[in-house]
Image: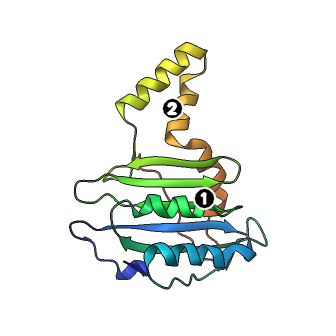
Amino acid sequence: MSALPPSAIPASTGPGRARGVVFIHAAPRALCPHVEWALTSLLESDVRLSWQAQPVAPPAMRAELSWEGRPGLGSRIASALKAIPGLHFEVTEDPSAGREGERYAMTPTLGLHRATIGVHGDILVSEDRLRAAVAGAAATGADLIDGIAYLLGTAWDTELEPYRIATDDTPVRVLNHVI
């Protein structure tokens, strides 16, 4: 497994391989080495991130990393980063042969959210999860729209969006919704 710059990852990773991106939107400066250590351990490669100041939340730092490895590695990365306090991050694992993709979004206030991602980049919500949202709304009188917004991770997108915005001197990839 290796940590690669985005341009070095081939368009197809082949059978049994996955790829994705780690977006550290905001990390306390003192914890940046801990993020690198966690990624180094999981990727089995020396990871040194190019940290930039996070203008939305000074003195926090931000960075991103493209990765390649075994399918399911995205969830292991998200779990390891979740254990580091104060991080705002997203981890994606692209769809690959026989597997849907995944997106993990984490904020200290909301916790961790997982979504299944289809080949076109859209969030896929299973029939069972939709049925549970409908049943929950019917049983509690809650608004079904709120339940669907939860399934889509709307609150996480709202909280993370200011961190995603790039300025002229700070390179950050903005994640777009596919409609």
- As helix, strand or loop, the secondary structure at mark 1 comes to helix
Residue linked to disc 1: 82
Up-down relation of residue 5 to residue 135 (above or below): below
Q: Is residue 24 left or right of residue 178?
A: right
Q: Identity of the amino acid at label 1?
A: Lys
Give neighbour class at mark 2: few <14, some 14-19, many 20+ (Cα, 10 Å).
some
Residue 40 at x, y percent in the picture: 51, 78
Image point 57% across, 42% down: which residue?
154
Up-down relation of residue 129 to residue 73 (above or below): above
Q: Quarter-wise, where is residue 89 in the image?
A: bottom right
Which residue corresponds to mark 2?
148
Q: Quadrant of the N terminus?
A: bottom left
Tag on residue 145? none
Between residues 136 and 178, which one lies in front from this camera angle? 136
Comparing marks 2 and 1, which lies closer to the viewer?
Answer: 1
Residue 171 visible within the image: no
